[in-house]
């Protein structure tokens, strides 16, 4: 907490993310207020001020474009190659996996993985269906959307919040889920009633003038749907058991309204402010056809001949006049010599690669620690959540080990669909990782049945689970950068003394977002280019 108070942005963000992830979004909102966190419009402005490189940059100075070897073909590495390519740099990207994108990974039928425990899976999803195992939602302010526009990757709305999705807190005694709209009506209703009452009783007389109090009560009546007696007694916001229709069918309101005490005890309110977060507010977007349309488009734009997949880097040496990177591809050992290098692997992987970049670099890399997150895609033969539950996209929040259950934001009214049966983190993700894929499915399905009923099991066609901490060559979902990326200990990563630059979401204020990878790559490219032009 002391870190929070000393104003380091990175740890504040990480802290907020962790509160958001653990479901304490109410806590997150309160915390943001307490920290005075708001000023992100300026940040977005700053990102837009990035000056893309141009071919003319070299023509004008009479200098030749340098050769750059980029270690890592995730978003940061690809973005660096793409941006450098605009000025004619000769880039080579080395990627250990058999595809580019890094943690931007879309799973389709036929895709296979083997995790570090040796669990091998092949996805059996039907044609046209996919799961985004990594990034899956894009806020409007992030530069990721600018790259989608520039690269011609079409986007569609990703439903991050849905009034008809469920909340389920078993530990609070719930035996059936409650819809967001119902929970919101009840929580906002009672909070409004209590605040109106307190105002009426004079509890706020010192804080507010008589006119303020009147306006506050007017607001609360509307916000909480209070009657003239200033009491919350439920209403149509909660929902219906029979919806209104033709004459003769006025609709039947949902059962009994719980008491204020019951509502607060259910803990449902803790999820509401998730959507107030700067990162998570609707509207959000996704690329049509899968998140990996982004790395695919970047790879095409860079030129596939510049990207070597299956290339596992084993040494990075700064020779003083250049950089020499050794890698193995299959059984062959190869070396790329270049003028500069950009290290765009996760820090936990970079830290394992022998180099001569100094102990400052090594201890900085080691200070940044990897985190776990996982998803399971459950493919169903029917879209029972749309048919039976009237849920079209959005997220069901639970206090179970599956944490978040995502309904697909594409393929509405189609025949099949893929539900994300868990998107969980930390210990929950790691405990599922230790199971076999079949056991993971069984455990996740058992939780889902409690919330949605038997079809969660009986309609299941296939599943595929992905655990980032156990994924070879990545071994992390995201990272914690203590003190934030501008902490003095990361200076050797942010301002290289030699010829190696670093880039990745883990060196940004938006770790766990592609935006962080893009902006970090832009920063490295800008610095490298300025140096090349002035050297
Ligand atoms: N970007 C990831 C997501 O949206 C991880 C994350 C979650 C980051 C919440 C910040 C806040 O799920």
Image (cartoon, rainbow, N blue to C red):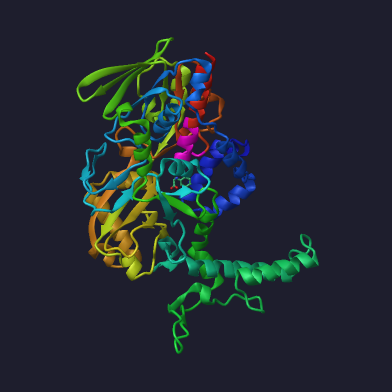
Task: Give the quarter of the image for residue 205.
Answer: bottom right
Q: Measuring 77% from the left and 62% from the top, which residue is drawn there?
A: 208
Which residue sits at x=44%, y=82%?
245
Instruction: Decide whether residue 283 is among the magenta residues.
Output: no
499 relative position to 386: left or right: right
> Looking at the image, is 321 positioned above or below residue 402?
above
Magenta region, main secondary structure = helix
Q: Residue furthest bottom?
A: 248
The quarter in which the N terminus is drawn is top right
Count the labels in the image.
0
Q: Is residue 172 above or below residue 475?
A: below
Residue 195 image offset from top left, x and y in percent: 66, 67
Q: Nearer the viewer, residue 445 or 335?
A: 335
Q: x and y percent of residue 16 in the render?
A: 53, 45
**Residue 1 visible within the image:** no
Q: Is residue 360 left or right of residue 30?
A: left
Q: Position of residue 203 (x, y in %)?
A: 74, 65
Residue 479 visible here: yes
Q: Relative to the observer, which residue lies in front, 298 or 265?
A: 298
In the image, what residue occupies the spot 41% across and 40% down?
A: 151
The percent coordinates of residue 330 (x first, y second) are 21, 25
Compared to residue 189, the image places residue 56 above or below, namely above
Q: Which residues are magenta?
A: 510-521
Question: Is residue 512 a member of the stretch shown in magenta?
Answer: yes
Determine the residue located farthest toward the top in the rendered image: 320
């Amino acid at each position: 907490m002391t870190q929070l108070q000393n104003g380091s942005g990175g740890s504040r963000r990480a802290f907020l993310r962790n509160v958001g992830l653990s479901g304490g979004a109410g806590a997150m909102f309160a915390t943001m207020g307490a920290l005075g966190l708001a000023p992100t419009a300026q940040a977005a402005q700053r990102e837009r001020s990035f000056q893309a490189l141009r071919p003319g940059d070299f023509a004008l100075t009479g200098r030749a474009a340098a050769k750059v070897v980029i270690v890592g073909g995730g978003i940061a590495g690809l973005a660096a190659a793409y941006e450098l390519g605009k000025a004619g740099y000769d880039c080579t990207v080395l990627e250990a996996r058999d595809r580019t994108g890094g943690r931007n990974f879309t799973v389709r039928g036929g895709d296979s993985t083997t995790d570090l425990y040796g669990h091998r899976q092949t996805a059996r999803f039907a044609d046209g269906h996919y799961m985004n195992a990594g990034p899956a939602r894009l806020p409007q302010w992030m530069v990721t959307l600018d790259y989608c526009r520039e690269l011609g990757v079409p986007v569609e709305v990703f439903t991050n919040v849905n009034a008809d999705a469920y909340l389920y807190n078993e530990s609070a005694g719930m035996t059936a889920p409650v819809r967001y709209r119902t929970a919101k009506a009840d929580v906002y209703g009672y909070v409004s009633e209590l605040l109106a009452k307190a105002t009426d009783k004079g509890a706020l007389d010192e804080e507010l003038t008589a006119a303020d109090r009147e306006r506050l009560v007017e607001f609360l009546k509307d916000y909480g749907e209070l009657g003239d007696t200033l009491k919350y007694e439920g209403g149509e916001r909660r929902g219906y058991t029979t919806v209104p229709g033709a004459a003769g069918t006025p609709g039947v309101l949902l059962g009994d309204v719980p008491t204020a005490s019951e509502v607060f005890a259910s803990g449902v309110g803790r999820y509401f402010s998730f959507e107030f977060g700067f990162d998570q507010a609707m509207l959000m977007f996704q690329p049509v056809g899968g998140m990996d349309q982004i790395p695919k488009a970047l790879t095409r734009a860079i030129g596939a001949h510049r990207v070597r997949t299956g290339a596992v880097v084993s040494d990075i040496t700064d020779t003083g006049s250049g950089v020499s990177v050794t890698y193995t591809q299959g059984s062959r050992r190869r070396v790329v010599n270049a003028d500069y290098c950009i290290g765009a692997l996760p820090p936990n992987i970079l830290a394992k690669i022998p180099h001569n970049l100094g102990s400052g670099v090594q201890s900085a890399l080691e200070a940044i620690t990897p985190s776990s997150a996982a998803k399971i895609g459950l493919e169903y033969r029917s879209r029972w959540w749309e048919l039976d539950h009237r849920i079209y996209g959005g997220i069901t929040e639970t206090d179970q080990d599956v944490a978040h259950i995502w309904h697909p934001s594409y393929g509405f009214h189609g025949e099949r669909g893929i539900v994300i049966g868990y998107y969980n983190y930390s210990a929950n993700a790691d405990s599922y990782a230790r199971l076999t894929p079949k056991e993971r499915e069984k455990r996740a399905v058992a939780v889902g049945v409690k919330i949605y009923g038997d079809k969660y099991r009986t309609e299941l066609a296939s599943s595929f689970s992905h655990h980032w901490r156990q994924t070879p060559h990545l071994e992390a979902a995201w990272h914690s950068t203590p003190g934030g990326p501008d902490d003095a200990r990361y200076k050797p990563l942010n301002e290289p003394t030699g010829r190696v630059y670093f880039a990745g979401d883990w060196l940004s204020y938006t770790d766990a977002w592609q935006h962080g990878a893009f902006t970090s790559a832009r920063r490295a490219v800008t610095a490298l280019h300025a140096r090349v032009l002035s050297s």
